[in-house]
Amino acid sequence: MTDVLLFHHALGLTDGIRAFTEEVRAAGHTVHTPDLFDGRTFDSIEAGVGYAREVGWDEIMARGERAAESLPDELVYAGFSLGVVPAQRLAQTRPGATGALFFYSCLPVDEFGSWPEGVPAQIHGADADPIFMDEGDVDAARELVASADDAELFLYPGDQHYFADSTLPSYDPDATALLMRRVLDFLDRVG
């Protein structure tokens, strides 16, 4: 099966991220979930992003890189929102990537060079999420899809940013079920 390195969102390595991870593992995949926040969790996106700023974005990126060092080169890099930053950087710069899964966020491809040839990707976001739709993420996702040989953008109805975290009020079980089917199909295909 497939090895996945999955980075959490701005709330930290929460029970919702763990539940998502366990579902992927139950399908037979290996998922590594490093804690970029050293055990801290937060009640709001603003507090988590504030902590990341306090620690420094360079250090958050370095923690992501250190998490990958002991793992095989052949990884699918995945990230939820803030976690897309180290995931996308590694997918674009670390040789051997077998795929990329970005949830709720995407950066412009040129942030880290160009999209690597032969690396498939999926980007998932809500079609009325003000963060994903209004802060440039959907535009970056469309650019990535246009520049890659095998990339897809999936939009789900709704205005919630963290719609696939089962422990939050923003959780959308129908959208998450569809997202999970697409993710597991992707992992089966690239593994």
Image (cartoon, grey):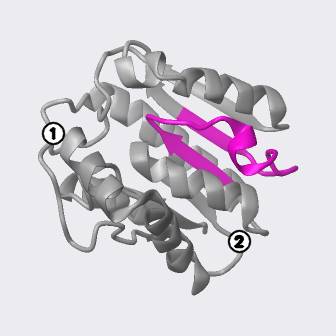
Indicate the quadrant containing the N terminus: top left, top right, bottom left or bottom right.
bottom right
Q: Which of marks 1 and 2 is nearer the N terminus?
A: 2
Q: Is 106 on the left or on the right of 47, as rendered?
A: right
Q: Magenta region: which residues?
A: 99-123
Measuring 56% from the left and 56% from the top, which residue is drawn there? 87
User: To which quarter of the image does residue 41 belong?
Assistant: bottom left
Measuring 45% from the left and 16% from the top, which residue is drawn there? 134
Kindly identify which numbered label has been placed on residue 1.
none
- Residue behind mark 1: 168
Q: Nearer the viewer, residue 171 or 66?
A: 66
- Residue behind mark 2: 74
Measuring 31% from the left and 38% from the top, which residue is drawn there? 164
- In this view, the residue farthest toward the bottom is 70
User: To which quarter of the image does residue 179 belong?
Assistant: top left
Q: Can residue 155 be found in the magenta stretch? A: no
User: To which quarter of the image does residue 140 belong?
Assistant: top right
Q: Nearer the viewer, residue 93 or 77?
A: 93
User: Contact (CB < 8 A) between labels 1 and 2?
Assistant: no
